Each structure stands twice: as C-alpha cells, then as structure tokens.
Amino acid sequence: MSPKKGKPDFDKDLKYGLDREDRIVAILEAKKTKAEIKTERDWWYRSGNLCIEIESFGKPSGIMTTKADYWIQIFSDGPDDFCRLIFDTSTVKRLARKYKHTARYGGDYNKSRFVLIPLKDLFKRENTKHVRKKDDD
C-alpha cells in the first residue's frame, strides 16, 4: 500500500499559521484591548468544570457585565499555572447562556451564581461559533 498522495498546501498553511500568530501578538501588545482574567485554583480538576460567575447579590455580574474584549481563564495547580485559555468574551457569554441550567450558588455568603461548563464539553463542535446560529451578543 502506497502512502496517500495529497496536494501540499504548505504556503496556504503557513499563511494561516502566521495570521494566527499575529492575532495573539496583537492581543498581547494592544493598548486598547481589555481582558478579564480569572483564575480557578483547584475546583476545575475536582469538578471537571469551568466555573463562570453570572450573578452576585441578585444582580448580573462577571461574564454578563464585563466590557472586556477577551476572557482569559487560568487553571492553576497549586502554586503553578496548568494552562491559560484565551476566549473572545462573546464566546464565554454564549456558553454561559447555553449552560445556565447548571447554575449554582457559591462564593462569599453563598450570594453569587455560577454556571458550570463541563471541560469535556468545552471543545465540542456544537459549542463552536462555526456551527451555531447567530446570537444576540
């Protein structure tokens, strides 16, 4: 059996990769870019969920009120950071709405509400922008 012959798209792939690199550099270097940065210490691996605040003391908060362009989620493991995920804020808002049925109370005085997005679902195809209908972010 001979290896499959395919059309090499090196130049196309290189251009695509360099474009993505430029996007990350723009996020990190932009003076006008706003980012909300949240860190989860250990509940992410204990529960298997990404926890996103949507309300505090009966009022919208967290992802529902942020003016940030990007949502950066840090998963720490003890004193070390395990990984950092950078999302467009609209993506996290959309996921928070989708998983609103998972909302739980917690935080100081148990007065904040959080949605729990299963980490195993985070990268499911139906949760990507490419396959969803236009929403009203």
Image (tube, rainbow, N blue to C red):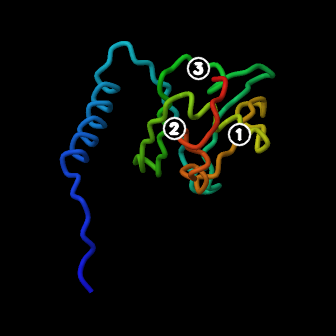
N-terminal of the pair, mark 3 or mark 2, is 2
Q: Position of residue 43 (x, y in %)?
A: 61, 50
Mark 3 or mark 1, earlier in chain: 3
Q: Quadrant of residue 109?
A: top right
Q: Residue at x 78, y 22 (%)?
A: 57
Reading the image, the residue beneath label 1 is 98
Q: Looking at the picture, tell me which residue is in the foreground, 91 or 118.
A: 91
* Label ID, residue 39: 2
Residue 116: horizontal and vertical position, in percent? 68, 45
Give the answer, above or below, for where 25 lies relative to 79.
above
Image location (x, y in percent) of residue 29? 28, 22
Q: Which residue is mark 3?
A: 66
Q: Nearer the viewer, mark 3 or mark 2?
A: 3
Q: Amino acid at mark 2?
A: Thr
At numbered mark 2, what does the secondary structure look like: helix, strand or loop? strand
State the mark number for residue 2. Answer: none
Quarter of the rendering occupied by the C terminus: top right
In this view, the residue in front, 94 or 82, is: 94
Residue 101 lies left or right of residue 82; in this view the side is: right
**Three-letter code, disc 1:** Lys
Q: Amino acid at mark 3?
A: Thr
